[in-house]
């Protein structure tokens, strides 16, 4: 073999090797693209198949669903783990720039007045439609996104980040875990009677602040005994940044000229509060747009 022949063969070998390598990379890129499309399509299909299932607060499926839990369930079926609260999911993944850029599989968020924190959410399934578990209608429903444009707050894209370590974006942080534990602690006392000045050593009755003190204590957080003392601890937050587990401190009435704190409640997410008062005792109450919301004078985060 001459030197010239050897050089030519070597050159051909390099070219072939480079072509194979590039071809492999192109194939891998195509495979990744296919996986993304398959996941989003499957999430949309799974979500749509749940239409008609009953709504139940915080239910995780597959027979009934809460608002955020519908998305959590659909993504779990394709091997993607996401959070299970509206406020948490509103921060995860990547932000979609506008309503016109929403794609199948994206999470879409809304509020009753089109501003502030989201109060309900769904999964966009394409063709201008999204699916969500509706408390008002009592079931999972299919809706046109355009009909909710005035209530639309934003959208988040999940699958693009699923292959990387996005733990910093994960809503399942220690703080959210503790908040969920606080709410779970409170739920076991639902229906327990209200008694003004109830002893902090009993669980047979509560007033508003002994209730918050008790359920936070069971989650490992110590609070002072009465509501005004409790309002002095933690970090002050605004209504627009309200998160599950935050303490809401209220004045006596909407028309009261004094901001003296007379009541405390726990924000439970999904536009509801968990607290105790009067004849219902420990109970959930609607918060958004109600007199409970209008009475708030301070919000503190202690988690």
Image (cartoon, rainbow, N blue to C red):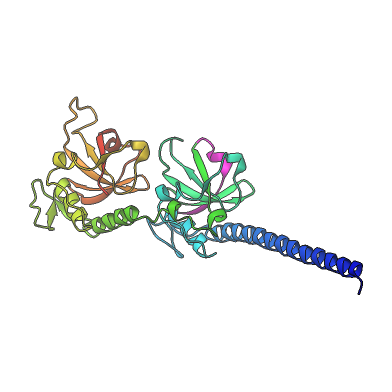
- The residue drawn where x is 84% and y is 64% is 11
Q: Nearer the viewer, residue 243 or 25?
A: 25
Question: Residue 170: image x %, image y %?
Answer: 43, 54
Question: Residue 151: image x %, image y %?
Answer: 49, 38
Residue 206 among magenta residues: no
Q: Nearer the viewer, residue 255 or 91?
A: 91
234 left or right of 270 in image: left
Question: Residue 239: image x %, image y %?
Answer: 34, 37
Question: Residue 101: image x %, image y %?
Answer: 61, 42
Quarter in which the N terminus is drawn: bottom right
Q: Residue furthest top?
A: 257
Q: Which residues are magenta?
A: 138-150
In the picture, residue 163 is in which quadrant?
bottom right
Residue 146 among magenta residues: yes
10 left or right of 49 in image: right
Q: Is residue 78 above or below residue 131?
A: below
Q: Is residue 224 above or below residue 51?
A: above
Whether residue 217 is visible here, answered yes or no, is yes
């Amino acid at each position: 073999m001459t030197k010239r022949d050897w050089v030519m063969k070597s050159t051909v070998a390099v070219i072939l090797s480079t072509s194979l390598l590039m071809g492999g990379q192109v194939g891998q890129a195509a495979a990744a693209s296919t996986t993304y499309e398959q996941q989003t399509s499957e999430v949309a299909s799974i979500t749509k198949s749940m239409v008609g299932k009953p709504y139940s607060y915080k239910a995780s499926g597959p027979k009934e669903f809460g608002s955020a839990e519908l998305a959590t369930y659909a993504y779990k079926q394709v091997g993607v783990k996401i959070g299970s609260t509206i406020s948490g999911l509103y921060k995860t993944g990547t932000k979609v720039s506008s309503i016109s850029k929403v794609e199948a599989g994206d999470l879409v968020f809304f509020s009753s007045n089109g501003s502030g924190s989201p109060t309900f959410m769904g999964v966009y399934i394409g063709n201008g439609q999204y699916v969500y578990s509706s408390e008002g209608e009592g079931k999972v429903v299919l809706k046109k996104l355009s009909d909710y444009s005035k209530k639309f707050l934003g959208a988040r894209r999940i699958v693009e980040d699923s292959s990387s370590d996005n733990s910093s974006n994960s809503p399942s942080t220690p703080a959210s875990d503790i908040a969920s534990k606080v709410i779970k602690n409170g739920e076991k006392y639902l229906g327990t009677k209200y008694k003004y000045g109830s002893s902090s050593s009993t669980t047979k009755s509560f007033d508003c602040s002994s209730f918050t003190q008790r359920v936070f204590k069971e989650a490992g957080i110590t609070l002072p005994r009465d509501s005004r003392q409790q309002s002095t601890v933690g970090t002050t937050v605004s209504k627009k940044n309200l998160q599950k587990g935050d303490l809401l401190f209220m004045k006596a009435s909407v028309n009261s000229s004094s901001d003296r704190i007379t009541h405390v409640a726990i924000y439970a997410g999904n536009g509801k509060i968990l607290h105790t008062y009067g004849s219902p005792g420990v109970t959930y109450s609607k918060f958004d747009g109600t007199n409970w919301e209008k009475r708030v004078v301070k919000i503190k985060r202690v988690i």
